[in-house]
Each structure stands twice: as structure tokens, then as C-alpha cells.
Image: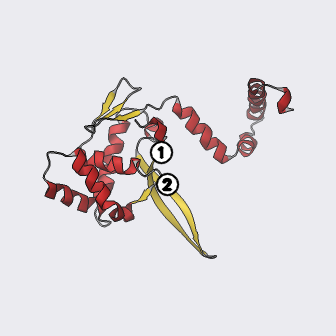
Amino acid sequence: MDVKQHSPEEIAEQIRKLTEQLKMAGRKDLLLRAIGAPLLEELRIEAARAKLSRLQITKDYRFFLVDYNNKEVELQPVHKAVYLLFLAHPEGIEFKRLGNYREELTRYYMATAKLMDKEKIIEGVDHLVNPLDNAINEKCSRIKKVFLDMMDEYTASYYIISGHTQKRFEGSNRIWYERLKVITLPRELVI
């Protein structure tokens, strides 16, 4: 198949036909090998984009799903602060290293909870960044529940704070894993 002689639409049609042949032969394994896992993930994201809504964050820190009839994502100020922190760090954050983000988290919390006492905010942040406290897990669970109440699980997986494990190498024989938490929503959908 010479790519130069065919339009992208013709190539896509040929791929569709070949895909159907492999499926009918019961060889999805070969199809997966041909596509490759990285491309499959890109295709999954592309397919989800049609269902994903833009997330608008207003100046007064209200969250709206623009393409879902401007439906508001109703979160408490502490949940908004946690969410804003993870939105600001698409590379991900390990919960055990949240202490490194104390100042930033405090700024977000103070911005979202204008009427709250500063001492209460600082106390709340202390709980969130303490690796021995379960507060951050509780806040992420609440955020997850709010999104799951608004959309299906697959779509919600792009909006919630979820785990991503990354393998790291140090020197030649030392391997460890970073258990990053991320929001996978493409940032171009955040307004």
C-alpha cells in the first residue's frame, strides 16, 4: 500500500477493512501488536475527547462543565484547593511529597475559602500534607464521587485525581516507583 497514492480517508478505510478481517479471524492480539499500546492510549484519549467537557474555573473559584450545559461541579473550598493544586501539576504529585507543596496548597485554600479563619486553613493544610494522615485520600475520594455523580466512570477518569505509577532508575541496579497522582484531563480543556 503506497501512502502517496491514497488519501488519508482511503487509508483509513483500508485499515478498517483489515481490522475487521483480523477481528473475524479472532486475532485481536495481532491487531493490538500492530497498533501498539502507546498509540492505543492516544486513540483512547481521542475517543474520549468527544465526550469530555471543558472545565471552566471562574474568578470566584466556581467550577463548571461548559459542554454539559454549564453544570456546576459543587465542591467545598478544601476540595477545590486540592483540585487546583493537581491541575497546576500535570506531571503528577506523590502524596508522600505533598509537604513540598504546602505553600501553594495554602494559597489555593485561602483563595477558595475567603471567609474561613486563616488558622483553620493552615490546620487543614497540615492534615492534607501529613503523610500519616488520611485526609488527602478522603478529599480525593470526595472529588471522585462528585464527578462520578455527574458522568460515567470512563469520562470521570479524566477529571478525578488518580494514580499513575512511573518506574525510575538510579544508577545501574536501583529501581523504584513513583506513585504519582494526576488529573489526566487535557489542559487545553481547562478554562
What's the residue at 45%, 55% (across, down)? 92
CA neighbours of label 1 inside 10 A, class few (<14), some (14 to 19), many (20+): many
Say which quadrant the C terminus sits in: top left
Question: Residue under circle 1?
Answer: 184
Residue 91 x/y as whole percent? 48, 54
Q: Amino acid type of disc 2? A: His
Q: Is residue 72 left or right of residue 39?
A: left
Colour scheme of the rendered structure: secondary structure
**Residue under the image location 19 percent in, 60 percent down:** 123
Report the amino acid beneath label 1.
Thr
Could you tell me residue 39's position as x and y percent?
66, 43
> In which quadrant is the N terminus drawn?
top right
Classify mark 1: helix, strand or loop.
loop
Evaluate whether residue 1 shows in this view.
Answer: no
> Which of the labelled discs sits on residue 4, or is there none?
none
Q: Which residue is mark 2?
A: 164
Q: Is residue 27 left or right of residue 141?
A: right
Label 2 near label 1: C-beta < 8 Å? yes
Question: Which residue corresponds to the image point at 19% horizontal and 55% vertical from the top-left?
Answer: 121
